[in-house]
Image (cartoon, rainbow, N blue to C red):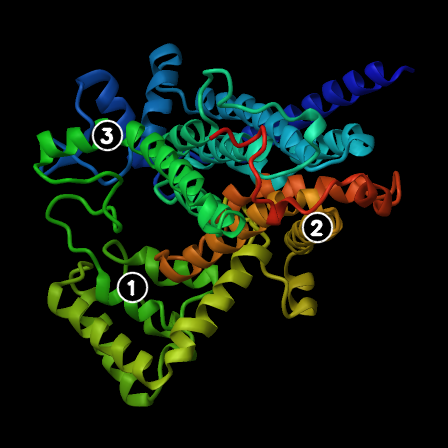
Amino acid sequence: MTSIVKMRFHVLSAVLAGLTLRAIFILKFPVSDAGDSPFYIDLAWNWLKRGVYGLTVNGGLAPVDMRVPGYPAFLAAIFAVAGKSERAVMFSQATLEMFTCGVIALIASRLAPQYARRRTVIAGLWLAALCPFTANYTAAVLAETLAIFLTAVAILVLIQTQFGGDSSHREPLGAGGSLSPWFLAGIIVGFGALVRPETPLLLLVAGLVLLARWWKPRNWLRLIRATALMAIGLALPLAPWASRNWRTLHRVEFLAPRYGQLPGELAPRGFDAWTHTWLWRFRDVFAVSWKLDGARIDVADIPPSAFDSPDQRARVAKLLASYDRTLTLTSAQDRSFGKIARERTELHPLRTWAKIPLLRSFALWFAPRVELLPYTGRLFPISREWDKDREDFCVTAALVLVNVVYLGFAVIGAWAAWKISSFRPAIAFLVAFIVIRTVFIACFAEAPEPRYVLECFPAVIALAAFAFATGIKPLQSARDESSGDRFAETAPSRDFPA
């Protein structure tokens, strides 16, 4: 079997396996009412059928800005063809996800030297196609699949010509009058920001890597130019949305309000500040955060770590008892929670600003990721969970193991690629993106939902794919082929047209 036939066989097999896995999730575990799904569906349908990007508020259709319009536009396009069919959305997402798998394989190829490229591409394609965590979200009417695709494309644009790799397969975008890669990356990230508002973190990371490369004064003009082009590209897709908000809602809003509240709703800043001093487990999100303004919150469901003293626990219990009578958080109650949050932070500042974010980061990356599946995700105590429900325990343990395997291969791949000097800018970019996005979510997200780091999986899988390249040829050979450390490169090159 020739190498071309083998490659085609792997591509076809991976695509079929990936589509089969996603079809299983869609047919067996479809989710159309999780989290923001009802909002997205209503926004898309109202926009398509009534010409208003809005929701029913106080008996009337009112324009809103509580969610950015990228994913509702995606839904509206599908609804225009297939009607208000959630299954059509899911199968469309499964198809889009296979394109994402191809993009991830291309990212992996940009991290591999010539001798290892084919094997790395195949590994990247199979790892992406068989990843259960991204596949699971194709069966949900949520923005993750589209956000992951746009993130992967933006990473590919930046990796392909700007952050090192094997120069033999890189073509300089921006030369010969074609579109500048900085501008193109900015545009793609801008569209991504209309799906997930935190997507511009990708450009922040790119800027930091460029600053590390171009810190000398003679390169400042190039740094300013690249930064300006990314900023302009980012602003262009956001400008129509900001203009609409100014015309319709009479306020400047380039993304969406942090709390995504409807007109007249209270933003629970004090309550969230209090949960940020103790909440790090995803199951506590179900018991507390997601019940706010909709269900009773029982103080018995809150872990002891949320209280510094019996008096503080009594104050929280009193506030929750008052809230439970109306199931609506008032401004006075929110201020009281904010006061307790300040007291806890003043008493233990490292707990709020270091310990809880670290625990949240751990939960984000090592959760079993069963939030869309009919399983509890509980493993401990092992004997009790095994006796209670063996299927639940086995599925949870298997998903934890798969997650650890993906992360383990990513660490091995990153370490191996870092030894090749020409790949260091790319590895720095991918690793910094994973770290900075994780820190941002851990510190600022209202709830540590594991889905918030799925946008990092294109980088994780691409790095993991490189681990499969290390067995073909000694890495020292690759280091010998490298012409120098491009992370410290300051001289002009064909990849950075002035």
Give the residue pinned by disc 1.
272
Q: Which mark is residue 418?
A: 2
Q: Is residue 317 above or below residue 152?
A: below
**Residue 354 placement (x, y as % from top left):** 45, 72
- In the image, 57: left or right of 304? left
Q: Earlier in the sequence, mark 1 or mark 2?
A: 1
Q: What kind of residue is marked 1?
A: Asp
Tell me if label 1 and label 3 are in contact, CB under 8 Å.
no
Mark 3 or mark 2, which has the lower sequence index? Answer: 3
Look at the image and tell me whether residue 78 can be seen. yes
In the rendered image of this protein, does residue 149 appear above or below residue 221? above
Q: Residue at x 42, y 78 (%)?
A: 350
Among numbered discs 1 and 3, the one appearing first in the sequence: 3
Dot 3 amino acid type: Ala
Q: Is residue 424 above or below residue 155?
A: below
Q: Nearer the viewer, residue 193 or 183?
A: 183
Say what secondary structure mark 3 lies in.
helix
> How far apart, in angstroms, are the residues tagged by discs 1 and 3?
30 Å
- Circle 1 crowding by C-alpha within 10 Å: few under 14, some 14–19, many from 20: many
Quadrant location, the N terminus:
top right
Marks 1 and 2 sit apart, C-alpha to C-alpha, by 39 Å
Local crowd size for mark 2, using a 10 Å CA cut-off: few (<14), some (14–19), many (≥20): some
Label ID, residue 239:
3
Q: Amino acid at mark 2?
A: Trp
Q: With 434 as the anchor, is 384 left or right in this view?
A: right
